[in-house]
Image: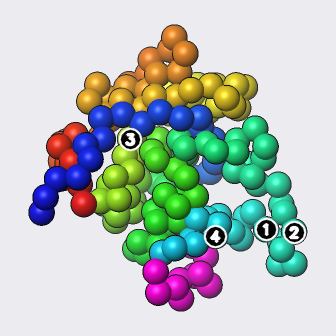
Amino acid sequence: MGTINAITQVTGTGVFVRGDDIDTDRIIPATFLRCVTFDGLGECAFHGERFREDGTSRDHIVDQPQHQGASILVVDENFGCGSSREHAPQALMRFGFKAIVGGSFADIFFGNSTTLGIPCVCMESQDRARLARMVQDTPDAEITVNIDALTITVGTETLPVTLRNSARQALLSGRYD
C-alpha cells in the first residue's frame, strides 16, 4: 500500500444533524444500494429524511441555504450504527463532507470513513453542544478540524477532540486507503 495525500486538517463550514443512533439506513436508504459504482450517491444522502415520497423537500437541515457547501458534519452519539454498508460514508463524502465530529461512531462506519480519508473525531458532549450552537448561530463560521493537534477551532475558540491513534497516524501519514 502506497501513500496518498496526508490529511493534517480539514477546514470548512459545518452543519449539525441532531439525533443519537443515526444508522446507515438513514444515511443512505437501502433502495439506493443497487448501484454498480458509488457515483451519484451524494444526492441520496439522508434521502428519506430530506424528501417526501413525491420528491418534494422536507427542508432538512443539510438542504437549508445557510448550510449549502458545508463540509464538516456535526452529529450526536453512535453515528453510523446499523448495517455495515460502505455506501453510507461514500454518500456523505460525495455529498461534500470531509470530516465528521460526533460523540461516538459505530466501528465499521468509522473504519469505512477513515479509509476514504474522512476523519471521524470524537468530542465531549458539552463541547459538541457548544460547537452545534456555533454552527447554528453562525453557519458561515470557518471550522478547522486539526488531526495533528486533535483540536477544532472556530474563530477564537479551540476545543479538544479525540481520534483513535491508528486512524490518526494513517491520516497524517497518507496511508489510510
Q: Position of residue 146 (x, y in %)?
A: 36, 29
Q: Is residue 30 part of the magenta span, yes or no? A: yes
> Outermost residue, top direction?
156
> Outermost residue, left direction?
1
Q: Which residues are magenta?
A: 22-37
Number of numbered callouts drawn: 4
Looking at numbered disc 1 in the image, what kind of residue is underneath it?
Phe
Q: Residue at x 59, y 81 (%)?
A: 32
Mark toward the start of the polypeptide (3 vs 4): 4
> Is 87 positioned to the left or the right of 134 in the image?
left
Q: CA distance from mark 1 to mark 3?
A: 28 Å
> Is 132 positioned to the left or the right of 8 in the image?
right
Residue occupied by mark 4: 44
Residue occupied by mark 3: 121
Could you classify mark 3 by the number of other residues whose Cα lies within 10 Å: few (under 14), some (14-19), or many (20 or more)? many
Q: Describe the element under mark 3 as helix, strand or loop.
A: strand
Q: CA distance from mark 3 to mark 4?
A: 24 Å
Q: CA distance from mark 2 to mark 4?
A: 14 Å
Residue occupied by mark 2: 56
Could you classify mark 1 by the number of other residues whose Cα lies within 10 Å: few (under 14), some (14-19), or many (20 or more)? some
Q: Residue at x 70, y 25 (%)?
A: 138
Mark toward the start of the polypeptide (2 vs 1): 1
Residue occupied by mark 1: 51
Front residue of 124 and 139: 139
Q: CA distance from mark 1 to mark 4?
A: 10 Å
Q: Residue at x 61, y 42 (%)?
A: 70
